Image (cartoon, grey):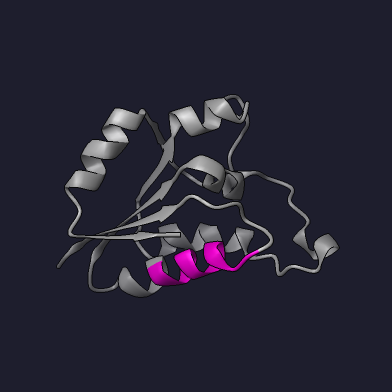
Amino acid sequence: MKKVAVIIATPPHGNAKGREALDIALSLSGINHVSVFFMADGVFHLLLNQYPEQILMRDYIATFNMLELYDIEDVYVCESSLSARSLSQVKLNIANKVIATQTLNQLLAKQDVIFRF
């Protein structure tokens, strides 16, 4: 069993990277230990009340709730990314652990494979 990190660092709408990251995380979780990291503009995936259909995008954000059902419990959010976007006090849509950048880097150093979206 490998330790796999899926980093989501791009905004949720306007491209398919968030959906692809979610697909990779869910598909690999059966045979690997998967951790998901939200950083940079990827933290926008965690906001409530998004309406992507208004810009003709598919609403996959609610599917992030599937992480828990697939036993992906290590979901980390970069504290400085939240702070830089004035989101530190905003309620997020899935269970997560907010961590400092140094801790995030330490966790990433322990991974066998890293996918960045």
Q: Quadrant of residue 5?
A: bottom left
Residue 16 colored in magenta in the image:
yes
Total tally of numbered discs in the picture: 0
The N terminus sits in image quarter: bottom left
Above or below residue 77? Residue 62 is: below
Residue occupying the point 35% across, 51% down = 73
- Residue at 27% x, 32% y: name it: 103
Extent of the magenta region: 15-24
Tell me: 114 left or right of 69. Answer: left
Foreground pick, 110 / 117: 117
Whether residue 11 is visible, yes or no, is yes
How far across and down, in percent of the image, does residue 110 sit?
A: 16, 48
Is 44 or 49 nearer to us in this picture? 44
Above or below, 18 against 39 in this view is below
Q: Check the image and report above or below for 74 versus 26.
A: above
**Image quadrant of residue 69?**
bottom left
Q: Is residue 93 visible?
A: no
* Residue 62 location (% of width, % of height): 62, 59
Q: Position of residue 21 (x, y in %)?
A: 46, 64
Locate residue 58, reporting x and y percent: 71, 70
Q: Is residue 74 magenta?
A: no
Check the image and name the residue furthest to the right: 54
